[in-house]
Image (cartoon, helix red, strand yellow):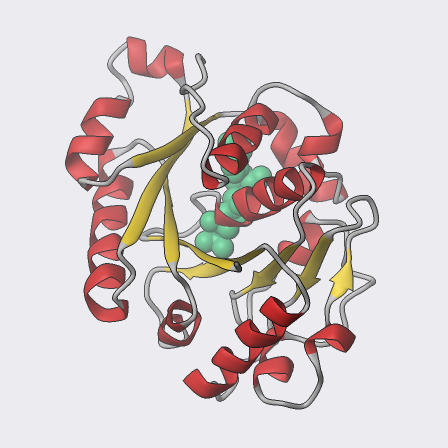
Amino acid sequence: MLKVILVASGKGGTGKTSLTAGVGAALAANGHRVLVIDGDCGLRNLDIVLGMSDRVVYSFADVAGGMVQLADAMARHPVYETLYLLTAPVRLPALSERGMDQLAKQAEQAGFDYLIIDGPAGLPAEMSFLAHIATQAIIVTATDRACVRGAERCARTIEQEYCIQRIRMVLNRVRPRLISRGRSGNIDDAMDEAGLPLLGIVPEDEDLIACGNSGTSIIAAKKHGAARAYQNIARRLDGERVPLMKI
Ligand SMILES: Nc1ncnc2c1ncn2[C@@H]1O[C@H](COP(=O)(O)OP(=O)(O)OP(=O)(O)O)[C@@H](O)[C@H]1O
């Protein structure tokens, strides 16, 4: 059965796109059929991080609006054959819940196991349409208190307004040295402040920045650091019990 996962955050730039690309590639590398959608209307960049800018023509809004079928609109990843991308429209489109339902239905009929939506930061108007089809959410946050507070607010709204019950948190850009010196919030404090179960932690990893710029998959490039963290998260999404990585 198709799992539809919304990746969201309170603040911008917390690592949603990097996580969507990394976890999507990890799930595909583990044999799943994965459709990733860039939900950041007007500010799309998942195609760049996936190295697929030259492959995208249609957006998810074209499919939801009935202008094109999913099978004709989605683009296949150059390395992972079971990973597909549907990009975001360049302008904010008129969306409908019915259109989004049709999109999810087509994804299910096409045999996808996962549909991962790289959502916009915060809670703009289009969020309600993206959240409408989601059955679970991942909130991505840094460990600093302001960011965690934003994550908590975002999670609460997603739960109350869009009725998504399964919401988990990923702590990104975790820097153990700063934590041990007391200069960065620690993992327990972040969990207490957000009141959310932890799906995973991703260490600060400068290779991510280089990979994102060149469109190289971090999963293909290395086995440790953020790549390992994304692999662990993919396995947990799949129901495996995987201990938190030591960083
Ligand atoms: N664990 C990490 N270590 C180092 N850099 C990271 C990490 N995660 C993300 N980044 C970098 O942070 C920047 C923002 O990440 P990303 O684009 O994934 O965030 P976003 O939440 O999707 O942003 P937006 O809210 O603007 O859509 C990028 O340059 C990315 O390479």
- Is residue 188 shown left or right of residue 4? left
Q: Is residue 92 visible?
A: no
In the image, residue 212 sits, relative to residue 179, either above or below, namely: below
Q: Quadrant of residue 23?
A: top right
> Observer-nearest residue: 44 or 193?
193
Location of residue 173 in the rendering, given as x and y in whole percent from the top left corner: 44, 29
Q: Position of residue 105 (x, y in %)?
A: 56, 75
Which quarter of the picture shows residue 191? Answer: top left
With respect to residue 209, does 66 lie above or below? below
Residue at 61 percent across and 18 percent down: it is 224
Q: Residue furthest front?
A: 1
- x, y percentage for residue 75? 77, 64
Residue 10 can be seen in this image: yes
Residue 211 position by quadrant: top right
Image quadrant in which the C terminus is located? top left
Residue drawn at point x = 32 percent, y = 66 percent: 123
